[in-house]
Image (spheres, helix red, strand yellow):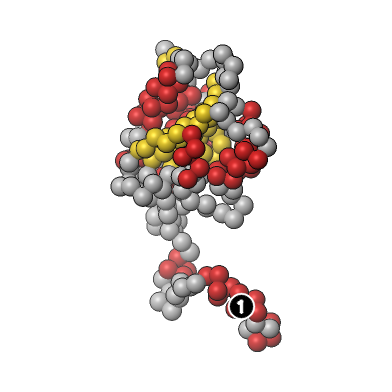
Amino acid sequence: MSSQPNVLILGIGNLLWADEGFGVRAVEEFHRLYETPDNVKLMDGGTQGIYLVQHVRDCDILIVFDAVDYGLPPGTMKRVEDEEVPKFMGCKKISLHQTGFQEVLMMAEMMDEPPEKLLLIGVQPVELDDFGGGLRDEIKDKIEPAIEMALAYLAEIGITAKKRAVPLPPESTIACQIMQTEHYEMGRPSEERACRSGDERLLVDKNWVAPQDHDAELEQILATPQGAR
């Protein structure tokens, strides 16, 4: 590793599903509050999946903020390093096209360009199944400690982030303008106007039953001649 390693601080997750957005909100807040040297890049990785591979390949040190299913009590923050990280990445795949970050790390490894050092700062989510919801308070409260953990790690490798005299205004941060926390959460429809946990046409239908084995039922449907369905 050179005397000035390339560092990528990456927030990943889906802002549309409550605590799944923790990683993105953490990196946004880091950028709002701190200045970093030129060799440190902060990035909202969202749900870009394999499109993040080149960014991962280009860095020597990777720090990731994410919502992680550690199997711990909700709101628990945990630090994981280096070869242990892939075991925990990807709390929940929200859609079929969303590639888990394990695959991103694997692809960088296959190309012989993985980061030399890797740190995951993860928080056990409280709630994921809340479409359009923001972070729960227990998770919001972990953003500052998560940033402090990242700052301490940077200090361990000789990199100092300087606190801004005045935090950046929302329009100057790396946050997507339409998804800025205040704008996003204040513009959310009420529960009366928007069902947040599923299709209300099914939820109120007493005759509807969730599939017990989705894959098996799908195979059965596909195997049945169209005229007999």
Q: As drawn, which residue projects farthest toward the bottom?
A: 228
Decide which of 168, 219 is in the foreground and name it: 219
x and y percent of residue 72 in the render? 33, 47
Q: Which of 124 and 115 is in front in this view?
A: 115
- Quarter-wise, where is residue 145 in the image? top left
Q: Is residue 97 visible?
A: yes
Residue 34 visible from this viewpoint: no
Q: Which amino acid, by three-letter code, is at mark 1?
A: Ile
* Rendering quarter of residue 205: bottom left
Q: Which residue is drawn at 62% across and 52% down?
A: 97
Query: At numbered mark 1, what does the secondary structure look like: helix, strand or loop?
Result: helix
Measured as percent of width and height from the top left, residue 18 is found at: 43, 46
In the rendered view, does 97 fall on the left or right side of 165? right
**Residue 224 versus residue 75 in the image, above or below:** below
Is 8 placed above or below 222 here?
Answer: above
Q: In this view, does 38 lie to the left or right of 68?
A: right
Q: In which quarter of the image is the C terminus?
A: bottom right
Q: Which residue is drawn at 32% across and 41% down?
A: 76
Task: Give the residue drawn at x 38%, y 27%.
Answer: 149
Above/below status of 69 relative to 3: below
Residue hosting label 1: 221
| Coordinates of residue 181 in the picture (x, y in percent) | 45, 36
**What residue lies at 53% left-to-right and 15% top-to-bottom?**
37
Disc 1 crowd rating (10 Å Cα; few below 14, some 14-19, many 20+) is few
Residue 110 screen position, x and y as percent = 65, 40
Q: In which quarter of the image is the N terminus?
A: top right
